Amino acid sequence: MKLKRIVLLIAVCLQALSLAAAPRIVRPGVKSPTTFAIFIDSRSYEAAAAEVDAYRAAVERDGLGTYLLIDEWQNPESVRSEIIRMTEAQPHLEGVVFVGDIPIAMIRDGQHLTSAFKSSQDRDWKDSSVPSDRYYDDPELQFEFLRRDADEPLYFYYSLSPESRQHIASPIYSARIKPPKREGADSDELLRAYLRKVVKAHAEQNELDNLFVFRGHGYNSEAPEAWAGEQIALREQLPALFRTGSTVRFYDFESRWPMKPYLLEKMARKGVDVALCHHHGAPDTQYLNGYRNGSGMNVSIENIKRFLRSKIDGHKDPEKRKAELIAYYGVPEAWCQLSDSLHTADSLLDQAMDVHIEDLYNRPMNPRMVMFDACYNGSFHLDECIAASYIFGPGDCIVTQGNSVNALQDKWPDRYIGLLDCGVRIGQWGRHVHYLETHLIGDPTYRFINRALPGTDLNTALTAKASDNKYWLRMAAETMPADVQAIALRKLADNGYDKTADLCEKRVAESPYGPVRLEALRLMSTSRSPRFNAMLVQAAGDSYELVRRLVSQWIGDCGDDELVPAAVEMLLDDELSLRVAYHADENMIFMNPDAVSAELRRQSAAKHELYQNEESLQKRLKRIADKQAEQTETFKFIRDPQNKMKRRLSEITYFRLYRHHYCVPELIALAEDAALEEPLRVAAVEVLGWFGRSYQRPIISAMCERLLQREQPRTIFEQTQRTSKRLEAY
């Protein structure tokens, strides 16, 4: 009896502690078909309570009932549990925003969910993990807690569980409002000023009638056809922008040199609604220009001198390095001279070519929304980053999209952008296009007025009617705006609608809109439909460059012999589309070497005399043969225990990016070889997960079944689970 009383007393105490630790929750003040939630830490709320309450009221005036949750938030699980509870309640939760110091999930074992991030996880965990709020906005992903960072108390490391779904399907959107922390700045005042700006913006009825696009040095190989294709596609996605009374501009890094002052002036202009920025980046830099372009001798010589100085200046042995460069490039010694004045001039030029974070501290950035299609500009986990500096500056910028790690160039950055002219909240747009690294910084509830589809509430539909196929069939009608059709096809595919393939096949063949054709192809690329190969062949000559570029990628990903003629034709017929040609050239070494070589001979002989070049043909054939021979040697190297483990592992992880389909049986043999060292087997199983579209997928799946049915070391078993589930996403 005494023991029972003790147990009861402990239970009561634990419940009291639980209640004491529970967050303070302010429930929505208005009824709405969907809801929104603001998560804020107690200290930040104390510092900006009036502004936070005003922000919540502004969101509710827009018809979106809003929760406010205030707590110390000791770990990510405490936040996630509240989100899960709200997603299971009615009305539907459509999104969340994290204000202040909310714990940050640093994801490991999930690089396949990023667009480009490939890093050895043996590196420092801060650098080899992906800061990601998919931990919060995709609650069905399963994670295993690893540890808290010793230096950064907000960093919590998680492994994507092998039992988890291995693709992203966020049912809600998320964003961060995390003021920069830098010397000389009051973070609390930055937060207060930003929220006041947001409240003011919500009171406006703002049309999306002013947009510009910027393209930086080195982006997409500086391919003119890729640049032109984006402009044509945007006209189809946002047709009202191209009519009298609206403004669209396209700025290229080559328009002026350096471009920096001109881009900053465009950003400072009042009335700009959206800026789409394609360039390279770092957490604190937007890289805009390279060296000055020009065919004049003086320009070329100065560029060479500057390049040589950059390789010598700061080197541990400048004289030795200078001698090496003179010998390698055959340049005069005078071109390699260093001086304090030249060092200063070079430093000033470097500063003048790119946008650095300190340029933004007191400069107004006025576009309401800025997309950073760049690496690292959205590194929200750091004390400051480019994407956050835009919204916390003195200008009108409300929300940005950026990436917390590096990002792929050959993706579809403008996907669904036309929905913004349908009054869709930027958060709703963002959750349908994000990768593991993609984040919104700022207010995700901001939206432009609905010009393209007045009377239709897509915001509510995207959450509350997400599984309503009848509704999305109506929205998929060919009379609808291009991106409304595209998102409707996406929803039908997500819902497993049994006639999705029919719809997609028809749109690829008949739609006048490039973005609709591309959406249909993209959906089919993960459908396992036997029709997909024929659709790829049909779309290989599409008028939209990005369709051809991604078709070329997908042909390489699939690798079927029946696609070899289309692959070779794209190589020979589309060589002036630089990004298409790049992928077409890579496909020559990924696919069946015998089939590719035979087809190259056949098509080259039948083409215009420009392509009947025996020397060029032999060069290509030699590359294919050399690469095949190289792979034979690669597997010998991997199996040789005399070679260093790090190098052997590197030879396996090579196949993540370079997916030679004919090497799959050898990789399977490595994975199943019980005599091979365990790390090599794990790497082989992992790399086979990158062959999700391959015609070899059935034998990879069969390997997974065999490994899972036998007793295996834990690391191999868990990696096999991951690979098996990854294959299910295709």
Image (cartoon, rainbow, N blue to C red):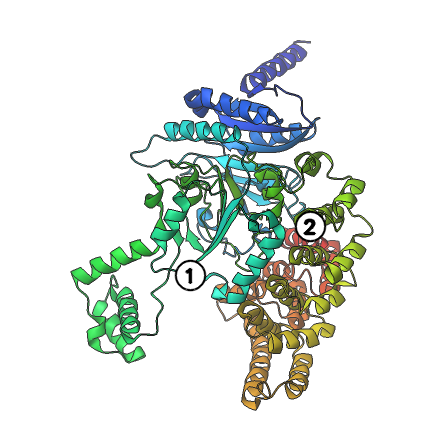
Please provide percent x and percent y for residue 126: 45, 46
Q: Position of residue 183 (x, y in %)?
A: 30, 36
Q: Residue at x 61, y 78 (%)?
A: 572
Vertical arrangement, residue 61 with respect to residue 516, above or below: above
Residue 77 visible in rendering: no
Depth order, front residue of 478/19: 478
Side of 27 relative to 216 (left or right): right
Q: Residues within 10 Å of mark 1 (few under 14, many from 20)?
A: some
Q: Which one is in front, 680 or 108? A: 108
Give the residue number, with chain letter if any, for mark 2.
Answer: 486
Residue at the limit of the structure toward the left, as seen here = 340
Q: Is residue 253 left or right of residue 358?
A: right
Q: How far across and how far down the image is residue 612, in percent?
A: 60, 88
Per the model, the C-alpha gap separating discs 2 and 1 is 31 Å
Residue behind mark 1:
217
User: Which residue is located at x 52 percent, y 32 percent?
Assistant: 98
Residue furthest front as drawn? 244
Disc number for residue 364 = none
**Image position, residue 341 (x, y; %):** 17, 60
Whether residue 295 is visible here, answered yes or no, is: yes
Picture quarter with the C terminus: bottom right
Picture quadrant where residue 63 is located = top right
Whether tag 2 and tag 1 are in contact, CB under 8 A, the answer is no
Question: Sequence-wise, which precedes: disc 2 or disc 1?
Answer: 1
Q: Amino acid at mark 2?
A: Ala
Is 512 above or below relative to 133?
below
Specify the farthest residue to the right.
498
Name the amino acid type tagged 1: His
Q: SS class of the residue under badge 1? A: loop
Q: Residues within 10 Å of mark 2 (few under 14, many from 20)?
A: many
Is residue 10 placed above or below 497 in the rendered structure? above
Seen from the viewer's position, the closer of residues 587 and 523 is: 523
